[in-house]
Structures are given as structure tokens and as C-alpha cells.
Image: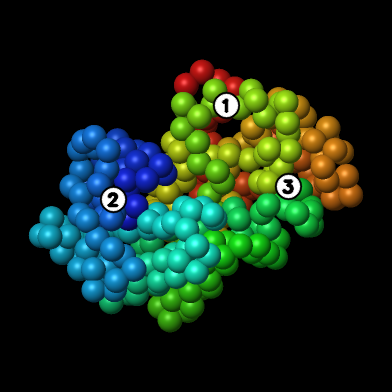
Amino acid sequence: MIIVTGGSGKAGRACVEHLRAHGHEVVNVDRAAPAGDPGVPFVRAELGDFGQAIAALSSVDGRIRGGVAGVVHLAAIPAPGLATNAETFHNNTASTYNVFEACRVLGIKNIVWASSETVLGLPFDTPPPHVPLGPDAAPRPESAYALSKLLGETMAEQFCRWDPELKIVGLRLSNVMEPGDYDRFAGFEDDPAKRKWNLWGYIDGRDAAEAVRLALGAEFTGAEVFVIANADTVMRSGNAELLDAFFPGVPRRAGAGGNATLLSIEKARRLLGFDPGSRWRDPA
């Protein structure tokens, strides 16, 4: 049994579908009901309340049979600007703590959760220290949302320090896209500044779901963080042209050429076997 919190959201829907397709029994825990019938049990819970969080992850209204193999924590206010700064910070920090603590109390040792590319310094009003930019770069949260995600990463480190058998994988997901979103990409060529804010990155929801499954199956313990993006940018223009125009003084490391992602996924490739197969340039 895999419990997916936030399974009604954009990344959550893809994750639920992908895990089911790979033979996992899945329960969706969310405060919003899923659209349509995804074919998995749904439990409504407010994860900012610890009592609801531990009840949802333990009994799921009697729907858990055979134990919980892992928890995928995607539930959150998913971006800056959707609520007040204080509400975003409080909701995301409290719900992440509650899920981590509920897992600790219940003896669940396998957690994958959605951190964010924003921890890297988005929207890059201050240029990045280098490109491609990966988890080796010092965190630089520039919003309450990004700060909430960085605190989640810090909490994961301490929870794993308390319990050396625990695994908590933070996936710094790039901007999640579905195939229907790709029609908009042609318009970015007219104004590349529209996507400068995340170095022209994206992650197809199907590849995000694959990263989640790989992280659940990873055999290491401890807290690890990975940048998860697709292997290309959202642009047809090459990186050299874009960087010359918007970040001319930023050092360019190996791998920054062509249309390759400027959000480094090398650690995810190396430790998770992540190999994103979707490209917006290809037919869905």
C-alpha cells in the first residue's frame, strides 16, 4: 500500500495513475476530492491537523490492509502567490512536519515528498551561481513558499538523524506540465523572459511520477534531495542565446549546451536511475 497525499492535484493525479499502473495499491489522502473517478480510495483529511494526519496514515478509515510500504507527500499549497505568505508557510511547514511525525510514530520508513525548484533561488532576480544548477548549490529561498520547502528539507535531515533506518527523499520538482499544456510553449519564443524565472525548465507529470516511484524503490537510507526536471528546456532557442541575453556573466558548466535542461538532474540520474522520457517537442 502506498499512500499519496495531495493525490487530487496535478502531480498527484499522475503519481496515482503511474503507481497503479506499476501494480501498487494506492490511497489518495487530500482535502479536495479528485475530479472524476481515478479508481482508488479517497480519504478527505486536513494534514495541517496532526490528529487527522496520523489517523489518515494509520487507519485510512479501515482501508489499509497489509501495512503501508511508503508515503508520497505531495499535499501543499503548490506555488507562491496562491495564498498569503503566512498561510502558505504555515500550511506547508505544518503539514510536512505532521506527515513526517506521523510516519515516525507509525514506523513508516519510506517517505518521498515534493520539495521545489524554488529553493534554488527562483525567480532568479539575482542570477544563479552557475548553470546547470543542481542540489549542490547553496539553497536560496526568495519567497515564503520556497522557505517552507527548505524547512521541509531541514526537517527531513533531522528526522533521519533521529532514525538511521528512515529514508526521506525530497524531490525539487520543476514546473509540472501535462500534455495539454504544451500548446502554450510556442508562445515562449516570442518572449523568453516569460520563462527566465526557472531557467526555462519544466517537468512532465508522467516523469515526475516516475521519479516518485524510483525514489520509493531506492535502497539507501537518510535524507536526500534531487532536482527533478525534464532533460530539455521549454524553448526552441538554444541555451547559449538565452544565457547571453539574460545571464551573460553566469559560469557555464558541462551540460549547459543545446537545449539541455539548465536544472541539473545528474544526481537523480546517478542515484535514482531517473531518465525522463517525455519531451514537449515530441507528440504525446
The amino acid sitting under disc 2 is Ala
- Quickly name the residue at label 2: 32
- Quickly name the residue at label 1: 184
Mark 3 residue element? loop
Residue 233 spot, x, y in % from top left: 66, 34
Residue 106 appears in the picture as rendered = no
Mark 2 residue element? loop
Query: Outermost residue toward the bottom?
Result: 162
Reading the chain from its start, which is encountered first: label 3 or label 1? Answer: 3
Spatial CA span between label 2 and label 1: 27 Å
Spatial CA span between label 3 and label 1: 24 Å
Q: Looking at the image, which residue is at 68% across and 58% down?
A: 121
The part of the image, by quadrant, that contains residue 98 is: bottom left
Residue 132: assigned label:
3
Reading the chain from its start, which is encountered first: label 2 or label 3? Answer: 2
The part of the image, by quadrant, that contains residue 49 is: bottom left
Q: Comparing marks 2 and 3, which lies closer to the viewer? A: 2
Q: Looking at the image, which residue is at 50% across and 36% down?
A: 177
- In-image side of 25 versus 151 (left or right): left
- In-image side of 170 versus 134 (left or right): left
- Up-down: is 48 above or below 177? below
- Up-down: is 53 above or below 63? below
